[in-house]
Amino acid sequence: MPNLRKIFIVVAGGNAAAERHFEDTIQRKRNLNEVKNFLPPKELENLEKIYHGAPFIVWGAVPGEMNEVRWQKMEPGDILLIYNRGYIRCVGEVAAKVRSRDLARYFWKETAEGHTWELMYFIVNEEEVKVSLEVINPLFGYKKNYAPRGFSMVENEKVANFTERYGDIVGVLKTLERKEELIEKPKQKALDIEAAEELIEAAPTEHDEMQWRLIRLGTLANLDIWIPKNDQNKQYDGHRFRELVLPEFHETLDVPPSIKNIDVVWKFGPYSIKSAFEIEHSTSVYSGILRLSDLRAETPNSNYPLFIIASEARKRKVFSELNRPTFSGPGLRLNEVIRFLSYKKIREIDESYKNRSDFDVNMLLGVGESIG
């Protein structure tokens, strides 16, 4: 059974010191140059690998019996909800944790009693949100007026129930922030890809070419890349895929197993999905659509973009299929969330950026064609 990611809630506010810390290390962020004099080389190397030199969010807790217990339970990939002034203001993943009085004192000084927030944890894949606790509390089974204190952990049973019902917490918060209705995960079995008998029309090398170009673009954006296990022994134009992609996929209840079959997945860190791409080269154009359909059914409130990559000649067929009620109904809305990119467009983008280091993943959203 997939792992269950734990969810922690941190109160970042409520007094002058906490509000100042919220501004200093969450809103403004910090950088690796500030921590290099406080941490041993191995921990610095780990942070450099995680952040690729980018600024980051960091927070901490004052030692105490319960804080120690919760901090010890915290693992990379766990979810952190940051609460401030009645709202969840930020959601992110735990990237790493360190215990350092000196670094905590550098960031936040000390309490009146001489303690500091030395139980530190670094955050990655953060998303700014603004969702009232009154809205999110009932989804976890809490009363509307429940208010967390300090550093707390949502009970695993509540997290499991929430995840099995709604999917990933980031997508849920973004949906609630837009004041849209949440979609519950369907009870029925996802569509069976194997039932769609089809022929492969394009030469395998064209599919491999698109995988390679998406691997290279994702790497230029400092992302981690996943492709299915069966594709990892492939190569294109002398480039061995296995050397450039993740060897294993981390499964959790909110990162569904079906995504392991998607042609290319861009990630940042062990869990967070940034984009998913299906390269559609089948006669019926069903295989890629069904894989994205399964993924969408399992994570109906997900917030990351989905793309279908196909030849320009196949675009009309893709659009026609995605607008069918099976895929465009209120449960999936694939025609609204999927964007189309042609083989030609991927080639143009990759060729223009392959010798540069400033590729931005959001650029694909701008050039991808909307289907809905």
Image: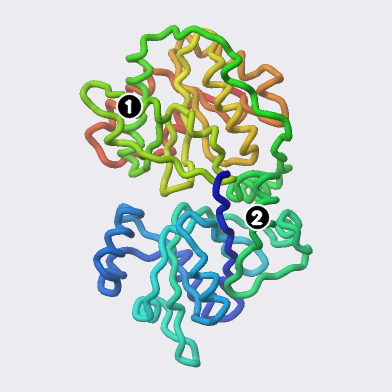
Give the label on residue 159, or none. Answer: 2
Crowding near pointer 1: few (<14 within 10 Å), some, many (20+)? some
> Label 2 neighbourhood size at 10 Å, few (<14), some (14-19), many (20+)?
many
Question: CB of mark 1 within 8 Å of CB of mark 2?
Answer: no
The answer to whether residue 349 of the structure is visible from this angle is: no
The reply, left or right, for residue 90 in relation to residue 242 is right
- Image point (48%, 29%), residue name: 262
Residue 238: percent from the left, percent from the top? 21, 24
Secondary structure found at label 2: helix
Q: Nearer the viewer, residue 169 or 323?
A: 169
Query: Which quadrant of the structure image shows residue 228?
Result: top left
The amino acid type, in three-letter code, at marker 1 is Arg
Residue 349 percent location from the top left of the image: 34, 27
Q: Which residue is mark 1?
A: 213
Find numbered disc 1 in the image and state the secondary structure of the residue it sits on. helix
Taking the spot 35% from the left edge, 54% from the top edge, the residue there is 50
8 lies above or below 184: below
Residue drawn at the location 41% of the way across and 38% of the way down: 361
Q: Residue furthest front?
A: 1
For marks 1 and 2, the one nearer the N-term is: 2
Compared to residue 222, the image places residue 72 above or below, namely: below
Query: As displayed, is residue 164 above or below residue 206?
Result: below
Query: Quadrant of the image for the C terminus?
Result: top right
Please say which color scheme the image uses: rainbow
Give the residue type at disc 2. Answer: Val
Place of residue 134 in the rendered image (x, y in percent of width and height, measured from the top left): 74, 61
Q: Position of residue 112 (x, y in %)?
A: 50, 91
Viewer-side residue, 32 vs 168: 168
Residue 297, located in which quarter of the rendered image? top right
